[in-house]
Amino acid sequence: MLKKLEEKFRFYFPKHLKNKNRYIKAIKGLNGIEIGGPSFTFSNKGLLPIYKHIEGLDGCNFSDNTIWEGSLNAGKTYIYFDKKQPGTQFISEGNDLKDIKDDTYDFVLSCHNLEHFANPLKALHEWKRITKKDGHLILVLPNKEKTFDHNRKVTTLEHVINDYNNKMGEQDNTHFDEVINFHDISMDAGVNSKDELRERVYQNFENRCVHHHVFNDQFVKEILQEAGYEVLALDLLQIHIFAVARNIK
C-alpha cells in the first residue's frame, strides 16, 4: 500500500529534473523577467529550483487580481524568492510588453502560462524582443497526454501561424466548445461539473483559465523554432514539458 502511494506521489511530484543543470546555466547570475509567476516549479522545493541562482527577476501578470496570485500591485513588489530583492511587477498582457524596451533582459521564464494565450506566437515574439541576443527562454508547458487535455488534439504549427498573421486577440473563443466537450473534468480540481466548466470557460477573459492550445514535445520544438529560438534542451517529466531555448535573432 505504501509503495503504491509513493509511486502515485512521485508520478505527480518527481524528486528532480534530470537535466536541471542545463537550465541553471542559462540564468545563473543574470537578470530576467517571468511571465505569469512566481512559480512553485522554480522554487527550492520545485522540480527546477532556479530562483536562488538568479541575480534579479521582474514579473508580469495580465491583471492586478488573478485567481493564482490574488491582488497585485505594480512597482517594486515582485517577490519570487525570500532571500532576493523584490523585482518590478508589471501589470500587462504578456504578449504586449510596450513598457519594456528591446534587449532588456538576459532571459525570460514562463511556467504553465503560454497555453493560456490565444496568440502564443505573438507572445514568443514579444518575449524574444525584450531579450538580448543569445539570451534564453525557459518554458514549462503541460504535457497533453498526462493532463486534462489528453482527449484534445495537439495544436498544429499552421494553426498558430494563422492566429499570428490574423492578429488574434486574447478575447478569442475559437476553442471554447472544444474545451467544454473534451476537457477531462476528473483531472481538474478547479471544477466539479460540465456546467461549472462551461461557466469558467466563458469567463476566460477575466480568469484566463482556458488552455487555448494543446502541446506535446514536437509542437513545442516547432513553435519555438518558428519564433526564432534555438532549442537547447527539452525534457518530458510526467505532466510537464520543460524546454530551454536561445534567442538567435
Image (cartoon, helix red, strand yellow):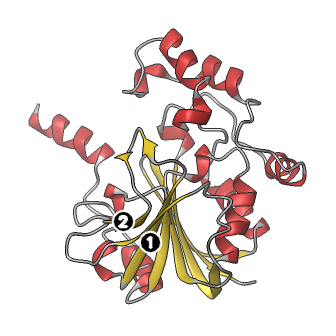
Which residue does the image show at 74% across and 69% down from the upper left? Answer: 225
Give the crowd class for mark 2: few <14, some 14-19, many >=20 residues within 10 Å: many
Q: Is residue 33 visible?
A: yes
- Quadrant into which the N terminus falls: top left
Relative side of 62 to 132, left or right: left
Residue behind mark 2: 78
Q: Does 62 appear above or below 191? A: below
Disc 2 secondary structure class: strand
Q: Disc 1 residue type?
A: Asp
Q: Disc 2 residue type?
A: Tyr
Relative side of 163 to 5, left or right: right
Q: Which of 84 and 212 is in front in this view?
A: 84
Q: Does 229 appear above or below 121? A: below
Disc 1 secondary structure class: strand
Q: In which quarter of the image is residue 6?
A: top left
Q: How far apart are marks 2 and 1 (CA)?
A: 6 Å
Q: Which of marks 2 and 1 is nearer the N terminus?
A: 1
Which residue does the image show at 79% across and 66% down from the upper left? Answer: 226
Q: Residue 58 carries which label?
A: 1
Q: Residue 70 carries which label?
A: none
Q: Quadrant of residue 136?
A: bottom right
Which residue does the image show at 53% across and 39% down from the upper left? Answer: 145
Which residue does the image show at 35% across and 58% down from the upper left? Answer: 41
The answer to whether marks 2 and 1 mark residues whose Cβ atoms lie closer than 8 Å is: yes
Question: Looking at the image, how many numbered discs can be counted on the residues?
Answer: 2
